[in-house]
Image (cartoon, rainbow, N blue to C red):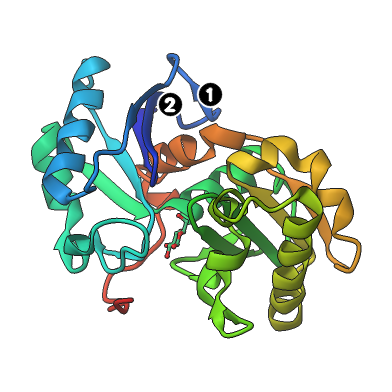
């Protein structure tokens, strides 16, 4: 089965058609800058443009950088607040003219990594973390996802963890690899104390340079491995969730706004 995967991020919106049985992209992915302000109609226009550029008809899976329950976006820490409470699945369904599933970006990346990447064959507790504009999280045990964990927002030193340890924070404060890795390690120590994972998969754009920071995380007992699918994980996971067995069940969950 083939589906179009679209990955909405704080800086770019990426898309490609995907063979969901193999995780392979069926065409080179395309990327368009995220509009500013990233209001729903402007983002929907980009989603429409990407769908049209692949002349796509068929199922579409879309990631969103916030809590998503049953197609409704519930939080928007790094996008415009007008997303909160919006029926994003309906908005994108109209924009693409196709049936659409929407899910959290880190959940999508995690599902892809567990199926085709660094989490293959891992049955214990796996914590996938994506370091980008924010910090996204996806939690698995026996390969099953607990959707919409928001572990980027635990409090460390009185602040939101992602404001200290995301890739964006590294750039914003011009932190050296050593300084930033120290912050990541402090964050992972908290996560390890709370979840006792067997494996931590680190993803997001900065995982491309994992050799510069992962070896510095010496105080963490869990194995830490970089994501394998790198920048394609969100696209692949988005496409996969159009197949009902891979879709997290979030119906009836209310979510919260922050
Ligand atoms: C959002 C999460 C998202 C993460 C990565 C956080 O600010 O709250 O839902 O997964 O950023 O984009």
Does label 1 point to a residue whose CB lies under 8 Å from ligand 1?
no
Residue 5 % position (x, y): 37, 34
Q: Residues within 10 Å of mark 2 (few under 14, many from 20)?
A: many
Residue 19 in picture, x, y percent from top left: 45, 25
Write down which quadrant ligand 1 falls in. bottom left
Q: Quadrant of the N terminus?
A: top left
Outermost residue on the front side: it is 174
Task: Please tell me which residue lies in front, 115 or 16.
Answer: 16
For image coordinates 72% across by 63% down, the residue present is: 184
Looking at the image, which residue is at 39% across and 40% down?
11
| Corner quadrant of residue 204 | top right
Up the image or down, 160 lies above or below 93; here it is below
Residue at left offset 52%, top offset 59%: 136
In the figure, residue 62 lies in which quadrant? top left
Residue matched to label 2: 18
Q: Is residue 208 above or below residue 186?
A: above
Helix, strand or loop status at disc 2: strand
Towards the viewer: 240 or 53: 53
Which residue in the protein does label 1 denote? 24
Residue 115 appears in view: no
- Residue at 21% over, 41% down: 43
Q: Position of residue 114 (x, y in %)?
A: 63, 48
Q: Are marks 1 and 2 in contact (CB under 8 Å)?
A: yes
Circle nearer the N terminus (1, 2): 2
Whether residue 258 sits left or right of residue 118 in the image: it is left
Please state, as top left, top right, bottom left or bottom right, where the C terminus lies in the image: bottom left
Residues packed near mark 1 inside 10 Å, few (<14), some (14 to 19) or many (20 plus): some
Residue 162 bears which disc, if any? Answer: none
């Amino acid at each position: 089965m083939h589906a179009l995967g679209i990955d909405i991020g704080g800086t770019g919106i990426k898309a490609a058609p995907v063979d969901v049985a193999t995780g392979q992209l069926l065409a080179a992915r395309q990327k368009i800058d995220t509009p500013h302000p990233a209001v729903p109609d402007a983002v929907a226009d980009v989603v429409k443009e990407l769908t049209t550029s692949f002349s796509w008809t068929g199922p579409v899976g879309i990631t969103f950088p916030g809590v998503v329950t049953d197609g409704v976006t519930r939080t928007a820490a790094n996008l415009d607040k007008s997303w909160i409470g919006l029926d994003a699945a309906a908005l994108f369904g109209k924009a693409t003219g196709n049936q659409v599933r929407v899910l959290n970006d880190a959940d999508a990346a995690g599902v892809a990594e567990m199926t085709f990447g660094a989490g293959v064959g891992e049955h214990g507790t796996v914590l996938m973390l994506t370091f980008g504009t924010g910090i996204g999280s996806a939690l698995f045990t026996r390969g099953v996802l607990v959707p919409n964990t928001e572990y980027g927002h635990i409090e460390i030193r009185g602040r939101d963890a992602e404001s200290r340890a995301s890739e964006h924070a590294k750039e914003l404060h011009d932190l050296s690899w050593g300084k930033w890795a120290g912050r990541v390690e402090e964050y992972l120590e908290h996560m390890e104390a709370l979840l006792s994972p067997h494996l931590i998969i680190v993803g997001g754009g900065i995982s491309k340079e994992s050799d510069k920071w992962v070896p510095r995380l010496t105080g963490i007992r869990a194995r830490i491995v970089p994501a394998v699918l790198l920048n394609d994980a969100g696209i692949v996971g988005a496409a996969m969730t159009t197949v009902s067995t891979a879709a997290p069940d979030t119906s009836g969950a209310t979510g919260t706004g922050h």
